[in-house]
Amino acid sequence: MEQFPPEVRERFHANPEQLGAGLVGEPPERWAAIVIEEYDPGWADRFAAAAAHLTAHIGRGVHAIEHVGSTAVPGLAAKPIIDIDLLLDDTADESRYLPALEGIGYRLVLREPWWYGHRMLVSETADVNLHVWPHDAPEPVRHKLFRDWLREHPDDRDRYAAAKRRIAGETVDRPGDYSLAKNDVIDRIYDRIFAAHR
């Protein structure tokens, strides 16, 4: 029997007409280039400071604040941008959280209601990507599974790091292709994750 429901086991793929449709305003300048750096232990401190700031200003309705993405995995090379999953009661009513986030220096850059209600904001310094999800969305579950697996499986961590460096070089003139180009290696790692949880 499978331990996780299909929406967790199967990666969400947007319809072609949805790709890029969620952009709000100008894309951050950092999106114009992919820079992979060696792991920095200070990334954990940057997450802790950002999480404390969010906790102090968002208030009610916060279910979780999680450090996800490559900067959350000790020893993993990464873009020096802290990815945070913020889980709220709901994301549809932006008036309940967006003014507070804007008030502490975040800017909405993606609104993707078709992707489990996802919203993404960036910090003023563009070194934090804040992903806002409804508390019951499956994607943050996937993020935690991937993070925890890489923390516990150095072979896959190193495999992923090598793939990221290679793909960053291959897409240097097309940085928008970088994330999608990682799908094959990410999917193979997820296959191992879910096989281990059966």
Image (spheres, grey):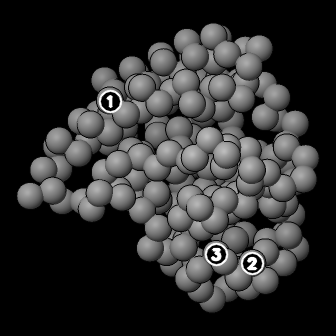
Dot 2: element? helix
Q: Residue 188 carries which label?
A: 1
Q: Earlier in the sequence, mark 3 or mark 1?
A: 3
Q: Residue at x 66, y 49 (%)?
A: 18
Quote the CA–CA distance across marks 1 and 2.
35 Å
- Horizontal and vertical percent position of residue 20: 73, 44
C-alpha span from label 3 to label 2: 6 Å
Q: Is residue 75 left or right of residue 30?
A: left
Left or right relative to 42: residue 98: right
Give amino acid for label 1.
Answer: Arg
* Element class at badge 3: loop
Query: Residue at 81% of width from left, 35% of height from top?
Result: 30
Q: How many residues crowd mark 3 within 10 Å: few (<14), some (14–19), many (20+)?
A: many
| Mark toward the start of the polypeptide (1 vs 2) | 2
Query: In the rendered image, which residue does mark 3 sit on?
Result: 91
Height in image: 158 above or below 46? Answer: above
The residue lying at 63 percent from left, 89 percent from top is: 60
Q: Judge by depth and name the residue closer to the eye, 155 or 30.
A: 30
Q: Can residue 76 be seen in this view?
A: yes
Query: To which residue does mark 2 refer?
Result: 94
Tell me whether circle 3 and circle 2 mark residues in contact (CB < 8 Å): yes
x, y (%) of residue 43? 62, 43
